[in-house]
Amino acid sequence: MPNRRPVIFFLLVGLLAGCRDPESSPAVVAKDPPASSLRSDAPPGEVNGPMVTGPVWFRTIEGVGIDFRHASGTSPVKPFPAANGSGLAAFDYDLDGRSDLYFATGTPFPLDADRSQPADRFYRNVDAWTFEDVTQRCGLGHNGYGAGVTYGDFDNDGFPDVYVACYGANVLYRNQGDGTFTKLDEASGMADPGWATSAAMLDYDGDGLLDIYVCNYGQWTLEENRWCGDRSRDLRYYCSPLTVKPAADALLRNLGDDRFEDRAADVGLAQRPGRSQGVVAADLDGNGTIDLYVGNDLNANSMFLNQGHGMFADASEASGVAYDYLGGMQAGMGVDAADVSGDGLPELFVTNFEGEHNAYYENLGSGQFQEVSQQRGLYAAGLPWVGWGTALADFDLDGRLDLVVINGHVDENRPDVDHAQPALLYHNTGGGRFALVGEQAGDYFQQPHTGRALAVADLDNDGDQDLVMGHRDGPPSLLCNERYRPGLSSAAEDDGRRSISIRLVGTQSNRDAIGSTLTLRAGDHRQVLQVKGGGSYLSAHDPRKLFAVPADVSSVDLNVRWPDGSVSELNGVQPGGSYTVIQPLASEDTVRSFSQGGQR
Amino acid sequence: MAGEQVLRAILLSCIPSPALVLSMVRSRRSKRKKTTPLPADGAESSPPPPRARGRWLKRACLVGVALVLLLLGMVWWQERELSRAAQALEQGETRYAMYLVGKFLGRNPSNSRALAIQARGLLELGYPDETIQIFDTIGAASREDMHALARAYMLRGEWSSAERLLVRVLQLTPDEPNTLYELASCQIRLGRFQQALTNAQKFATLPDQAARGQVMIGSIHGDMGNDREAADAFAQVLQEDPQAENVQITPAEFYLRYGRVLLRLGKPAEALEPLKRSVADGPSGTAFTLLGDAASQLGRSEDAALAWREAIKLEPVSFSARTSLANLALLSGDGKGAIEWLEPITGEENLPSRTTYLLQRAYTLLGDAEAADRWREKTAELRREEQHLSMLEEALVSQPGSFWARAVRAHRFANEGNWLQADLLVTQLVEEAPGEPFVIELADGIRRRSGKLPSLMRVPVTRFD
């Protein structure tokens, strides 16, 4: 029986500075001004000239100060890793309440370790839609072949650290708390020279320290790169994933002294090498422990259920999530897990290659899933495109999770396929069905892109979720959520719906509270969200959880189940603001540990 | 043949020999000399008697001309029968043509022109083997003969032999619609999609051939996996021929192809109409199955189930329809219902992994771990094979000229019973790699016509599960 403890609210003065020391005021409180007053009618960034007339859901914002341009390192010899692009992450590195953005990039093959200029770029969110490049100032900017990016407070010092999964040695940057980062040295156990893609942070063994699950794609070298393509037209394409020998994933256990060791083989994770691409860490079977779901390229996807005590059981085959509904292997790119059906158990969504369909698995309970993509309206629209990053999120604040998928083909020289492809936005229309949003989704969704990475973040702190879209060999796009709902004649914000933004801070559990489950209740309305590790493709979302609140509701109740199993109840929470909820402390020892971490 | 030689001899006899011509020229000269006064010294000897010699020559010449005319007349008279036969053949009166040519051959059994007409007639009557036999003897020299021989090869499935001839025919008559169409067809069969596409595109630009051409273009794109281009081509067909009545294939087949491509493009709503047309024009299990798939993708499960049931009525062993119905049962939590749909086909050959996978899922949901495990193993085995074959299929499209693509094609032809084409391909492969065990075994199987062919799983494809 989980403990019920009094909850401490902490006022997150979202738009004010001075939030850098959370433990200094472990008391209460609320909250930002109402969302509508935060919205800027004329954002500093230039609004893209609208092609679509009338209200749109997402508007592309330009001129925000982000001059990053991804480089895949593609060349006529088609180096395989260049097909997949690189990721991005949205997180608040300086605890000023705004999501900052990290963009990873590739580099030409053969890799040149002596490049003087940093490749990855990091931008601080100065104000809504204004960013500044702080890569050098922060000591970030990895110059290897960056693929996936994730973040998490591995040392529990209160500041999020950054992990970059690479083709070549992966890197972990420790956030010093003073606006700078330092790279952990080889002794940390990070320097696996293989080919990693996505990564997720999670505390799999419940020791309060974030561990890292690293997806490894396979064994590939430029020297062994094969010729694939159309000989009759002398067109060289990227080879099939089946030509790459899969590598086993790694589970880097945090030893607590800046060192990590790979325990995948010891905890039941290494028997399924599968060319992993996307990973999400969440409680998939509702037993209170954090599980793993991994999308594998032309191999069975993996579901590892945490048995407690740091051991996993491979439930991939038995659960029904390893293959599509007819048992076919798919490309397994981006993944997400979230409770769409409202039963408290997360559904799973996986993006796939063209000619395959994106797969949506409904959670039946008891560790069983059923693919219902056709029945939910998620089958057909994705068929012609190559899907990558994805997210299940309530974009229009109607209390139902919508879905976004970014697309783009791997080959840029095939006459028969579009390299750039349109992203897809699905509106959850209720009754278990999704409908593809047409031109009202916004200009971005009408135009083709070489999409790869995708992260959800409330970039302007207006109480809804914006999008950061990463493109292979191109600049990213920032999409401002206008909260338009199809069928409305004006923006949805006008109908009075509000949101509550929650950031959890673990104390006995890991600082990011990854593995927590939040349940919001307002009369009949109930919504369950989890604080997850990983998700999407090579990318990491804003850690804040955002609940929609019906317009006629004046207060809601919130239940938090922390990763260690303790439970907190928050009653009478007022909608329309951002809250930080700190896990109640259990003992003086814990407090001391917490404080020591915070002094960093 | 002997008759022809006689005729040639007579004709040749009518043509004055060079010696005769020379002597005639001399005789004319000598006539002119007759009026020329002799030299005064009379040193030359006197010429032969001129009048008698001139008369003789004149008569011989007249006789010769008469003979030639007579013989030419005889030839014309005889050939007139052949011309009538050829004309009848061209007009589609094959049996009459065969009667005429048969009559002629009764008198002139070795006449090569008559034999060629007979060969072409036999082809029209559906005897490609005999056609090829005759042309093997007399040779196919004219455009018509080469075309007929190519078509005979096509009927026998000897696509590469046919292709070679059609290329020559096309050189003689560029832009001849039928030849272009047939050439593209051969190239499709040989997996040379790019060349086929070029010829089909050329064909589609010819007068009155747009609809047929676009059907072919759409089908080639479909085979290559270029679904969008295929759909564009099929849409164009309907602009040219709104009922798809003159497009080489039946309207039902056309609408089926169109609907399938639209489904693959993720356009189930657009696919509904052509699939309904296909079902209406010529109901088939495949069309009903695809119609069910379209309905299912639109969330209309009941309509889907109806269509899939219809498919099973027409094709009781319809893996796709049964699997879809089983999945529908699973969606409603009815594991037993799913098994009932699948059990009747578990003993069938070429059982796909999707069927066994649903059995695995059904038994899992029913809690029968043993049965689930059994089907899981079977599914894994089938899936491995399917994946291997799918990689081979990819190689066939992307590298049709590669050694292993040709080996797979030879295997496929042999499997279809097209031993001749398989033999043609494998002979070449053996020459290229005489020590390759797979090819040696394949060649042996093909030559024995045994049907005992090496497994395609042995084709070395670099692939990692």
Image (cartoon, coloured by chain):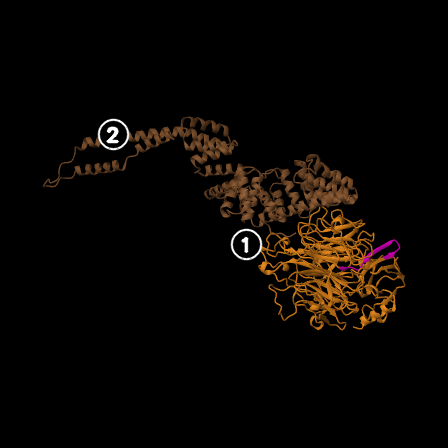
Chain colours: A orange, B brown
How far from the left and from the top, in percent, is residue B368?
78, 43
From this view, report whether residue A127 is shown above or below residue B375: below
Parent chain of label 1: A
In this orientation, which residue lies closer to the viewer: B447 or A344? B447
Kindly report the distance in space between the C-alpha atoms of the residues bearing marks 2 and 1: 75 Å
Check the picture and name the quadrant holding the N terminus of chain A: bottom right
Q: Which residue is mark 1?
A: A234
Mark on residue A533? none
How far from the left and from the top, in percent, is residue A542?
76, 63
**Disc 2, SS:** helix
**Disc 1, SS:** loop
Q: Amino acid at mark 2?
A: Arg
Residue A523 on the magenta span: yes
Helix, strand or loop: magenta stretch = strand
- Residue A367 shown left or right of residue A170 in the figure: right
Q: Amino acid at mark 1?
A: Asp
Q: Residue at image x 54%, y 46%?
A: B437
Q: Which residues are magenta?
A: A520-533
Q: Residue at image x 46%, y 44%?
A: B171
Q: Which residue is mark 2?
A: B59
Whether pointer 2 and pointer 1 mark residues with C-beta atoms closer than 8 Å, the reply is no
- Residue A120 shown left or right of residue B410 in the figure: right
Residue closest to the far front: A266
Residue A285 visible in the picture: yes
Residue A544 on the magenta span: no
